[in-house]
Image (cartoon, grey):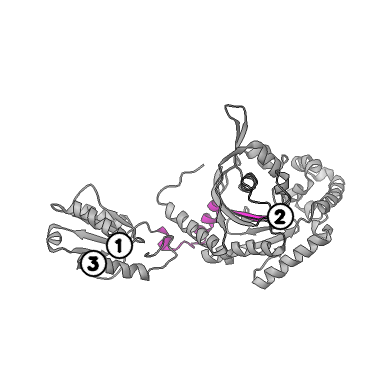
Amino acid sequence: MNDLLPERSPLWQYFEQHVRQLMAQYGYLEMRTPVLEQTALFKRSIGEVTDIVEKEMYTFDDRNGDSLSLRPEGTASVVRAAIENGLLHNQTHRLWYAGPMFRHERPQKGRYRQFHQVGVETFGLEGPDIDAEVIALSARLWQALGLIDHVQLEINSLGSLEARHAYRATLVEYFNAHLDQLDEDARRRLDSNPLRILDSKNPDMQALIEAAPKLIDHLDEASVAHFEGLKQRLDALGIQYVINTRLVRGLDYYSRTVFEWTTTALGSQGTVCAGGRYDGLVEQLGGKPTPAVGFAMGVERLILLLETLALVPAAAEDILDVYLMGQGEGVDTQLLVLGETLRSRLPGLRVQVHCGGGSFKSQLKKADKSRARFVVMLGEDELAAGVATIKDLRGEEPQQQLDTHSLVERLARWIDERPTDSGHSNRV
């Protein structure tokens, strides 16, 4: 579990700003749920025979003896909240969430025991059009972040519950005929959840898994039509994809469409976003039957990907626009007044006022270290003349002495000209 230090925050804000703008573009509304839930919620939704429930959840009994768990993922909590608050019956919803999740797994590059996810959940829509929309939404985020050429979309269909049950029998028969080649985890899952064997990362079993019967060859007619409809819409949108018949996802509540966005830029652990359709989960958790589809993406992994590929704009690392400094009688008070004036007149401007005194040279060093674009300086002479000196720390323009009105106009022009992808808004 890691601290996010101040110098890293602008990069996270840059990413989050893109997410918020994207969700607004598509008309998705934010949902916020508690980080603590009843343990039974995750056992019922994720499945008791999963690594998450068996090995990774942070679970404890509270003072009343109730078993609680820190949420390991977001979908179950959103479904629980939607049921409890009557959001689902005869309604459609497009929702999104962002926040910390918790899993006690072996830390890897870009993976932590407290990690953050952004997720999308939609309810009440059963056609392949909404499946295509949530995939298109994620593709638009990759486009905005400059990642679209570094990720690949993989899709598959898990079919209906009935089709999976029939396929399950075929799969069990196949693996029973090769029992001596199964590792301990696979043997344990053979009776409880044989589809999860297909998700095994054990290199010694890959040839066996590759030769196993394919679920996509055992789909029911309606699921085939749904999958064809999804592919047709992705083709129309110009979204490239590959069909991965071994893609089953790690959670038990998926049905029909499943998908992952993967990358080769971070090594073998290449999934940065994954999701699919989970039409049975609402009913499984006590609600009325409700079609649903969504996805989740790992924020730490995506930020690591941006850094690895050097796709972080310099502006996303900026913290300040203007640093105010000065020396002399009454100057410190006037600096505070000027700072408040600039913030009031230019709400998109990030301004820091030097506090604590010090020599002119030391203040200028702090201004430069702050990574501000401009330093505005006041001395007793400027104070008497009603002007301030502005210096562009990152450009070629000579410094100028301007009155307050002209200073505001000068900074307003710069705000209008600067790039808008820096993770903060322009002038209001």
Q: Tell me the quarter of the picture where residue 40 sits.
A: top right
Tag 3's secondary structure? helix
Residue 374 appears at what percent x and percent y?
A: 29, 62
Crowd around label 1: few <14 · some 14–19 · many ≥20 (10 Å): some
Q: Which residues are magenta?
A: 293-317
Image height check: is 101 above or below 245? Answer: above
Name the amino acid, label 3.
Answer: His
Crowd around label 3: few <14 · some 14–19 · many ≥20 (10 Å): few
Q: Alpha-carbon distance for marks 3 and 2?
A: 58 Å
Residue at image point 60% right, 63% down: 137
Comes first in the chain, label 3 or label 2? 2
Name the amino acid, label 1.
Answer: Arg
Q: Which residue is mark 1?
A: 345
Residue 165 appears at what percent x and percent y?
A: 83, 49
- Residue 291: assigned label: 2
Query: Is residue 312 found inside the magenta-colored segment of the image?
Result: yes
Residue 28 appears at what percent x and percent y?
A: 57, 59
Q: Alpha-carbon distance for marks 2 and 1?
A: 49 Å
